[in-house]
Image (cartoon, rainbow, N blue to C red):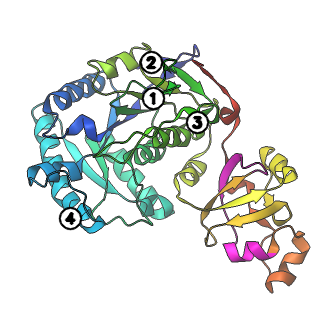
Amino acid sequence: MILPLPSGEKLSLRRVVIKLGTKQITDTRQLNEENIERLIDEVMRLRQQGVQCVLVVSGAIGMARYAMGMGEREFTLAEKQALAGVGQGLLMSFFAEKFQKRKTWIGQVLLTHYIFDNRKTYLNARNTLNTMLEMGIIPVINENDSVATDEIQFGDNDRLGAYVSVMVGADLYIMLTDIDGLYAYFGTPQQRLIPVVRGIQQVARYAQKQQENFSRGGMITKLQAAKITTTAGIPAVIANGFRPGVLEEIFGGLQTGTIFLPSGKTINYRKRWISSKKMKGKLVVDQGAKQALLKHKSLLAAGIVAVEGDFKEGDTVLVVGPEGEEIGLGIVNYESREIEKIKGRKSEEIAILLGKNKVNTVIHCDNMVLYGEEEYGSYSGD
């Protein structure tokens, strides 16, 4: 299937990830069954055109809340995890029934951030998803809320869907929500939809955090998700999941929602994995180090001016410039307390300062993912 992009390019679509928001599945009283049936029919039409589909779904806690008559009160983390265990079973049973009516099998996959952080479990999960897709099974993915803690949870399914898109090598990531896309000057008389974005930093100021009673995401997390996929070379779309024919409009090249375009560069699978790892800290570098990194050089201790967070060797950290501008992320060869000791120092001093020999690079260029030119790009609509 070929998708015409606003840039004039044509994108070949073989595999897509579609994230259904909580409100597509439940409202304050019951299941949005009619809306789900319509979306499932649209997914089935995509499959008939040869497109492999992965679904990322929210709403397990909401499903249990309504099924058990729990009302709208606030719950503790432990209560939410218990409700998620009930709701996930209900959610999968519901989707399985709907797809079975269409003679299609689905498979449940529950993920936590630990799976993405560990290279072995990451590759195993990727192989499982690829095999399911090749077998004609639709993976239905959710976060494993019943066991996820603050340290390993995604916190919202927008980013989970982005990480899954990177993992399976999707050609497009679609976030369906209850608004039409990203707006400039949201909530003012000047409000207008931004149809195309190439450079998320250019529009970040327009992100308005939506106050949603039964979901954890908002526009800020959707921009973060789009940043994850575009960094890996995957376009992302935010569109209204209540709009009849929304998927067909997107795949027909019609202007629907907001599309985020990558720079056109591609990165290898290892760097795609790095971009999926949870960031454990931050390194602030000087202007010289920033310029070296943008030329695909390794990060040395001499260029580091500050360390934030408590992280270990092998963790992934965010690297920012002297003005706080985000440069990229990478896997560190030192733990945070070691970098505190060697920051701003020459490589030949490291062994003396630490009392042991280690590699000279704090982050090797092969383990660094730059956010790239797309972060300084443009958008249409302002």
Q: CA distance from mark 3 to mark 4?
A: 35 Å
Query: Relative to the observer, which residue lies in front, 304 or 100?
Result: 304
Q: Say which of marks 1 and 3 sits in front.
A: 3
Circle 4 residues within 10 Å: few <14, some 14–19, many ≥20: some
Magenta stretch bounds:
321-341
Q: Which mark is residue 204?
A: 3
Q: Position of residue 95 (x, y in %)?
A: 17, 41
Kind of residue sitting beneath label 4: Ala
Q: Is residue 209 left or right of residue 374?
A: left
Q: Is residue 312 above or below residue 374?
A: below
Mark earlier in primary sequence (1, 2): 2
Q: Say which of marks 1 and 4 sits in front.
A: 4
Q: Is residue 204 left or right of residue 319?
A: left
**Residue 337 drawn in magenta:** yes
Q: Is residue 364 visible?
A: yes
Mark 4 lies on a secondary structure that is helix
Query: Relative to the observer, which residue lies in front, 353 or 164?
Result: 353
